Image (cartoon, rainbow, N blue to C red):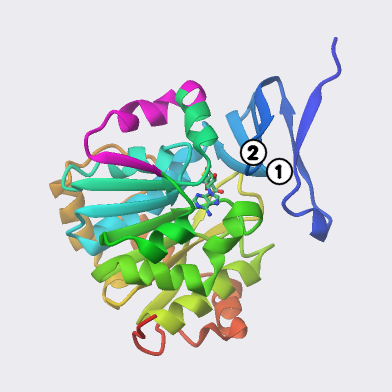
């Protein structure tokens, strides 16, 4: 029997941790001009995509991350028409956003066309409902450049980026968040993929400290995603409307019903409300990094 090949997540090598997944079949492996990509099948997680040694998406648990990165900001806001996705190459986020019929336009700014191309073949469950949707627009560009220059405005910006390494590093800077602030409509919401605080507390704390220098509200919310190893995953949340993260369950329920009550497998109105109740070690990490006390910032500042 051929030697079993194991794929290792190398994101946490510097802290002495590797997690490995048996690759029952390698479906694709290549280096694009931006990053190394490998897609393989694992008996437990289905298809798994890794970019530069970091797990991006698996068919088994993608629903957690994709539901929580989309329905939380959209239903907290309550009147979203224009959404910007930065990154999101596999189109899993866009597929979830488009379930909201009242969203008129979804613009996805992805730096690496190869990720979208390859997802057409290997993640048709995401790209199928998205790429031909007249409400969807794909822009191949660096998200940093886009938010610094576009004249378009958005009610929600979702940063579905890789980790702060390689092309994703710029998406964790104050300059990028200031660009997002510039592109948001009044009361708009920015949410960000912000890693696993148990291993990377400085990542979310750094982002939230930037949020609080730019927005009236900067915090994060959490979800449990099995292949984002290390417990809670943090999703950054920034807005000038302090009421949004406290949107009552009844209001979320009503908005969800108005949106058509599409099936979900992780998100519920109660889960959304509870997701902002941070475990103490995460709340403390936000304070220690100078992100300021509580979830509020020091007032909305223009970038
Ligand atoms: N769900 C995954 C996670 O939480 O890590 C992210 C999925 S998606 C594959 C991440 C995407 O961000 C990739 O397609 C990558 O090419 C894109 N990306 C990285 N840096 C970028 C940048 N500066 N501008 C736009 N897209 C970028």
Q: Position of residue 61 (x, y in %)?
A: 52, 38
User: Can you give x and y, in whole percent of width and height, for residue 223 in the image?
Assistant: 49, 55
Give the residue number, with chain letter if any, for mark 2.
Answer: 50
Image marks 2 and 1: residues in contact by CB distance under 8 Å: yes
Q: Can residue 133 be seen in this view?
A: yes
Q: Is residue 224 magenta?
A: no
For residue 53, the mark is 1
Res. 9 image quadrant: top right
Residue 274 in sight in this render: no
Which residue shows up at 58% across the image and 80% down it? 284
Disc 1 residue: CB within 8 Å of ligand 1: no
- Seen at 25% across and 57% down, the residue is 75
Q: In the rendered view of the protein, which quadrant contains the N terminus?
A: top right
Vertical placement of residue 211 versus 71, above or below: below
Up-down: is 47 above or below 70? above
Q: Is mark 2 on a helix, strand or loop?
A: strand
Residue 299: x, y in percent? 35, 88
Report the residue at 40% width, 83% height from top: 296
- Residues rendered magenta in the picture: 121-139
């Amino acid at each position: 029997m051929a030697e079993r090949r194991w794929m290792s997540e190398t994101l946490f090598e510097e802290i002495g941790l590797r997690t490995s997944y048996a690759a029952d079949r390698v479906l694709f492996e290549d280096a694009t001009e931006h990053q190394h990509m490998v897609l393989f099948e694992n008996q437990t997680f289905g298809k798994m995509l890794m970019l530069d040694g970091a797990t991006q998406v698996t068919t088994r648990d993608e629903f957690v991350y994709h539901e929580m990165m989309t329905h939380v900001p959209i239903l907290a806001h309550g009147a979203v028409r224009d959404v910007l996705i930065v990154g999101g190459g596999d189109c899993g986020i866009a597929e979830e956003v488009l379930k909201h019929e009242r969203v008129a336009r979804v613009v996805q700014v992805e730096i690496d066309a190869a990720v979208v191309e390859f997802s057409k073949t290997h993640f048709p469950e995401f790209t199928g409902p998205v790429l031909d949707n007249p409400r969807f627009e794909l822009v191949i560009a660096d998200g940093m450049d886009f938010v610094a220059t576009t004249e378009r405005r958005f009610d929600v910006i979702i940063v579905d980026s890789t980790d702060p390494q390689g092309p994703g590093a710029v998406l964790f800077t104050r300059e990028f968040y200031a660009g997002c602030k510039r592109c948001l409509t009044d009361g708009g919401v920015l949410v960000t993929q912000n890693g696993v605080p148990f291993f990377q507390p400085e990542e979310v704390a750094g982002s939230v400290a930037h949020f609080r220098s730019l927005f009236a509200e900067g915090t994060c919310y959490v979800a449990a995603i099995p292949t984002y190893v290390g417990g809670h995953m943090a999703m950054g949340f920034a807005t000038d409307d302090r009421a949004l993260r406290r949107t009552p369950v009844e209001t979320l329920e009503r908005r969800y019903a108005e949106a058509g009550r599409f099936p979900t497998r992780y998100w519920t109105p109660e889960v959304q409300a509870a997701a902002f109740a941070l475990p103490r070690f995460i709340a403390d990490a936000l304070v220690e990094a100078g992100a300021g006390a509580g979830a509020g910032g020091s007032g909305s500042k223009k970038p």
